[in-house]
């Protein structure tokens, strides 16, 4: 039953209020018991009953809710560093895909990988993420693209949820691309998803969400609508990859089907923004993907001004965003998309939790909530984003348990 | 007398050849004795005399020359995180400067700082840099802006050079801005630089370079010419901050005075590029500053195609680039400026060394050169930039001595 005292700046990130309102408490204390926060508030108000608890000293540092990475493709085989170099030299994402690279290349490698090999790699990535302050990760399938191999990926995630000290949310992304063997009969692939894969995933309770990549090179709006409604009918909430490479009407569809989130959105139209605001769909900014692909930055200010809640995530995958560095994604959302440090912090905590249907259990710090938090070597969120450097996360606590601890950061200035 | 064997990819980064030619050796070995490389080459060719030396195993990883950060403003007082947030909300660098913020604000805080406080902070930063693989750092004065206080900053650097396990190169940047007390008599300040500060620095051998910030808000081309030629006359090689916020003719002046480098250059003109190519001036890209300030990326491909060698550095300072993360700077030079991983690696090693007049002693790996190198958890430079994540530098060796060691990186995938 520890009490963390002398917290210089505690960002609670409650669900209510504007995107920039992170509900700060200066000179705060945080007490937890087992997996749950027992008390939180200004240290001077700490009730006497907690005075006897074991004290830990935050040394004036920043404490934030455990970060939520609400968009990753965690399990994959192989890498695609050759495409990274090809893109720098001018090849486009769609050109690379047309030449047999891109997602199809990762599908080949993932199908060849054993379940154990996939598990082992995912575990390594989750360790790296925990060292950044992340306590919850959304994981998409989408590199199997057959009933059998999509189930393998989702079972890998189920195994991680059982064994790793990380919150895991699983998303079926059977509709990532049309797999090569269905190229000339794409309707048959959509039938397979609707008639077999989605029901199988729902029966086995292997995912909470059903996602579709709506794009010229992937699925049309009409195909996506059919897939998402089929998922919704069996309890899988819709999510979309939308308007990433062109305005393909994905944001409008997200609003129409009541998606939990629409992600990417570099090319979202003004009518798409208005529709998402009306429907309360979370927009998820993926600035690493924008930067890796040389895309224009998301018009995040426009979305926020229109009343859309903007989450920020990594999109970690071996092609368009081969980095799980959520700290860097937040920094890029500030510098390239002009979100403020408070806005990106809320975007990677309670808003990301909302994009995962976890608004009642993750992403914010309050009594009776999970004791998921990170201690950051900065006096406040602005400084954390401003003086960007690695190794700023000193400690990560998930459900009351310390899952990462670093004594001190290399330069404490 | 150790031999590092089983190096998967060794990038020698010799001075000759194109920017993209990093002179790789696969399956390499590297032997050093004292401060110096004794032998380097394919492991199969390792001469018998080295077979008995103590063996260390690089486990197939990447070895690169110790990185050279050829542009930093290491010693400063205070921070300016408030300006970071103001810029995100739309204030420009020049607006902030006009309101008393910007460099002038750091000058106030630096003048108030004691020498010991400055030293202590610099030491912390150097520790953080060494953990990134950096073995040589250029350090500019420029926040003192009086004879006495500029000398203090350069003496701090001289002390670091004596006590820290890091190569230090000092640059006098007395011409950073015109200090507030000289606002209405700027010529008197230029006189002070030319008549007193530059001779004093040269006498005390406290700097190798003399730098000028050529910009509307700082110094004109005519003023810069006078200052740089005065420095050159007493042995301080010219360097320039040029064409950062507008095309101010800085690149042309750099070529005219035979500068070692011209840095920033986001707004360089085509004639500026041609002049730098003819004069052999190194262009130093500072992508962190571009990103922090919301500037357009440097046209690095244009410079490289014109035959200009492009270095890459951090510009670490509390205003326009409050990050010493050279790894991130290299990543941004790839993704935003379309330099290839090999090009940025050469840019932060032998080309950066050339920008510091160290082309004969730093930034490349060859027999009889200094044993300055880093072991990176990646199979090659492309993968290092592609799978961006913190904590990839496993070991940093400077002059044969291990100055940073990390057992393994968090995710070895």
Image (spheres, coloured by chain):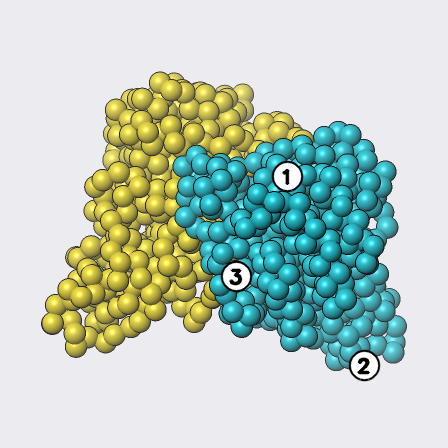
Chain colours: A yellow, B cyan
Nearest to viewer (mark 3 / mark 2): 3
Nearest to viewer (mark 1 / mark 2): 1
Mark 2 sits on what residue? B52
**Chain of the residue where label 1 is placed in the rendered structure:** B
Could you say which quadrant of the image residue A357 lies in?
A: top left
Q: For the point 25% across and 74% down, which residue is it?
A: A55
Q: Earlier in the sequence, mark 3 or mark 2?
A: 2
Q: For the point 21% across and 41% down, which residue is it?
A: A16
Q: Residues within 10 Å of mark 3 (few under 14, many from 20)?
A: many
Q: For the point 60% across and 56% down, which residue is it?
A: B145
| Image location of residue A206, percent across then percent down | 33, 44
Could you say which quadrant of the image residue A88 lies in?
A: top right
| Image location of residue A388, percent across then percent down | 49, 53
- Mark number for residue B225? none
How many numbered marks appear? 3
Spatial distance from mark 1 to mark 2, Cα to Cα?
58 Å
Q: Residues within 10 Å of mark 1 (few under 14, many from 20)?
A: many
Mark 1 sits on what residue? B215
Vertical placement of residue B272 versus B350, above or below? above
Mark 3 sits on what residue? B111
Mark 3 and mark 2 residues within 8 Å of each other at the beta carbon: no
Vertical placement of residue B102 versus A43, above or below? above
Q: Earlier in the sequence, mark 1 or mark 3?
A: 3
Nearest to viewer (mark 1 / mark 3): 3
Which quadrant: the N terminus of chain A?
Answer: bottom left
Q: Are marks 1 and 2 on the same chain?
A: yes
Q: Earlier in the sequence, mark 1 or mark 2?
A: 2
Q: For the point 56% across and 36% down, which residue is it?
A: B295
As rendered, which of A20 and B169 lies closer to the eye?
A: B169
Spatial distance from mark 1 to mark 3, Cα to Cα?
23 Å
Could you say which quadrant of the image residue A406 lies in?
A: bottom left
| Image location of residue A223, percent across then percent down | 40, 21
């Amino acid at each position: 039953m520890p009490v963390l005292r002398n917290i210089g700046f505690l960002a609670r990130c409650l669900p209510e209020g504007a995107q920039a309102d992170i509900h700060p408490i200066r000179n705060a204390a945080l007490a937890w018991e087992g997996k749950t926060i027992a008390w939180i508030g200004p240290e001077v108000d700490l009730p006497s009953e907690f005075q006897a608890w074991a004290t830990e000293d935050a040394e004036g540092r920043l404490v934030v809710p455990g970060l939520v990475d609400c968009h990753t493709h965690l399990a994959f085989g192989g890498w695609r560093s050759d495409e990274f170099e090809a893109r720098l030299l001018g090849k486009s994402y769609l050109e690379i895909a047309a030449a047999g690279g891109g997602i199809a290349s990762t599908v080949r490698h993932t199908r060849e990988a054993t379940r154990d090999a996939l598990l082992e790699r995912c575990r390594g990535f989750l360790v790296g993420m925990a060292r950044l302050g992340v306590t919850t990760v959304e994981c998409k399938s989408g590199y199997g693209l057959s009933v059998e191999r999509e189930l393998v990926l989702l079972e890998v995630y189920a195994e991680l949820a059982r064994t790793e000290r990380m919150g895991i949310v699983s998303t079926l992304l059977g509709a990532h691309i049309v797999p090569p063997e269905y190229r000339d009969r794409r309707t048959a692939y959509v039938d397979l998803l609707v008639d077999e894969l989605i029901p199988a995933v729902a029966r086995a309770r292997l995912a909470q969400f059903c996602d579709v990549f709506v794009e010229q090179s992937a699925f049309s709006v009409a195909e996506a609508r059919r897939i998402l409604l089929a998922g919704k009918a069996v309890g899988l909430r819709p999510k979309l990859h939308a308007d990433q490479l062109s305005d393909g009407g994905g944001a409008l569809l997200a609003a129409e089907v009541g998606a939990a989130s629409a992600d990417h959105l570099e090319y979202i139209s003004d009518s798409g923004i208005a529709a998402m605001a009306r429907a309360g769909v979370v927009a998820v900014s993926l600035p690493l993907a924008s930067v890796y692909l040389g895309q224009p930055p998301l018009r995040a200010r426009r979305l926020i001004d229109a009343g859309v809640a903007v989450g920020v995530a990594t999109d970690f995958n071996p092609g368009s965003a081969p980095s799980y560095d959520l700290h860097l994604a937040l920094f890029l959302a500030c510098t390239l998309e002009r979100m403020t440090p408070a806005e990106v912090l809320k975007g990677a905590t309670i808003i990301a939790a909302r994009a995962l249907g976890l608004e009642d259990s993750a992403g914010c710090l309050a009594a009776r909530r999970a004791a998921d938090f990170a201690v950051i070597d900065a006096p406040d969120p602005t400084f954390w984003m401003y003086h960007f450097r690695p190794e700023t996360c000193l400690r990560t606590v998930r459900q009351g348990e310390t899952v990462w601890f670093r004594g001190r950061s290399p330069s404490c200035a």
